[in-house]
Amino acid sequence: MYEYTPSYPCDATELVKFRNRIGKDGVELIFSTSVALHKKDAEEKRVIIDTTVQEKNVTYPTDGKLAIKIIHHLHKIAKKEKIQLRRTYVKEIKEHRIKLRFFRHPKKIKKAKVSMRRLKTITGILIRDLKRKMNEEQLKNYQETFELFLKVSDQKQKDSNKIYSLHEQHIYAIAKGKDHKKYEYGTKASIVKTEKSGIIIGVVAHKTNEHDSKTLEATISHANKHRTKKIKEAICDRGYRGVKEVDGTAICIPGKPLKRDTKYQKEQKRKKFKRRAAIEPVIGHLKSDHRLSRNYLKGFIGDEINLLLAAAAFNFKKWMNHFFLLIFACKVAMLIKALQHIQPKDKQKYTNLYLLVWKLMKS
């Protein structure tokens, strides 16, 4: 007998080991299966493409936070290698952390800047102290770590290729023009969905912060991998301007109607670009229902796996909805057949049931 048990079906580490075993290729196979289940619906000639940000599970990056984290890492290295530092600066760091709070306030900017400069100085002092007291083998082991710390310490506000997190160095800042969130920190993700059926047939995580038009080649080639026929037309927003065709796929971007267009052509264009907005709720569902809003998997491969799994989950859910709807339709048909055999004198009793069935059939 089955009994309710208030516990998870498996330990969280089992899922981690499963993901590591199958890798990106295994997750790609799961995604291609989710597309293949929909058969003809996934073979539409016209698709919609858009990009979103897959945010990484990192704290909001500031120079003060990064400097303090670097100092704590250096303390850990000294403890691990049993090196006695000349000074740890623990008490002083606590004071600087307090001064860095609300650093944008006009009355606190000056003190915050002084604290920031001092924290960078302390970082350099600790690195030089460790280097002096380490032997050649230890220096070789920590050479890359020290170079990373110095790079983070020296970076300026307007530098390119900045490091925003010590444990997720590949992430970058993306400005999407949102009022409530000026910058998002993670990786850009492209999503391809069919125009009418709304099935996700391609997803790509981008390692660099490219312009949307530069992402089309990788995105369309990934979508074509999961189909038998190539995509003929892709509907995009104005962020993709500058590209007319990619790998035999026409790129359509909304614009002003041409003078030579007939009334019918203008109406068709209007309907086509109005339909483009249908990808926005799909992205919303991926983020709210399928864990795309915040990625907890490590590294860039974690970004790729999380994106593929979210898209596969969306497709599987869509297929299951159709499957259960079919079962429900069969049960309704059986109920109607049973109602046909009721005697006329008893039909008055079942008036409400008839109305219910009629409503279900209409819906």
Image (cartoon, rainbow, N blue to C red):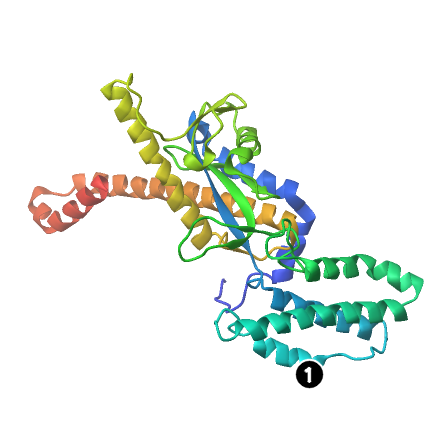
Q: Position of residue 247 (x, y in %)?
A: 54, 23
User: Is 58 left, or right, of 233 in this rendering?
Assistant: right
Q: Position of residue 183 (x, y in %)?
A: 50, 54
User: Is 163 left, or right, of 224 in this rendering?
Assistant: right
User: Is 322 left, or right, of 355 in this rendering?
Assistant: right
From this view, report whether residue 164 is shown above or below residue 196.
below
From this view, report whether residue 195 is shown above or below residue 114.
above
Q: How many marks?
A: 1
Q: Residue at x 85, y 60 (%)?
A: 141
Tag 1 secondary structure:
helix
| Quarter of the image that includes the C terminus | top left
In the rendered image, the residue lying farthest to the bottom is 91
Residue 211 seen from this side:
yes
Kindly identify the amino acid type of the residue bearing the numbered disc 1.
Lys
Q: Quadrant of residue 259?
A: top left
Q: Position of residue 108 (x, y in %)?
A: 52, 75
Of 80 and 181, which appears nearest the observer?
181
Of 142 and 276, which appears nearest the observer?
142
Q: Residues within 10 Å of mark 1 (few under 14, many from 20)?
A: few
From this view, report whether residue 177 is shown above or below residue 268.
below
Q: Quadrant of residue 90?
A: bottom right
Q: According to the image, label 1 marks what residue?
A: 91
Q: Residue at x 36, y 39 (%)?
A: 278
Q: Position of residue 286 (x, y in %)?
A: 45, 49
Of 13 and 255, which appears nearest the observer?
255
Residue 44 seen from this side:
no
In the rendered image, the residue lying farthest to the right is 136
Q: Quadrant of residue 131?
A: bottom right
Of 69 and 192, which appears nearest the observer?
69
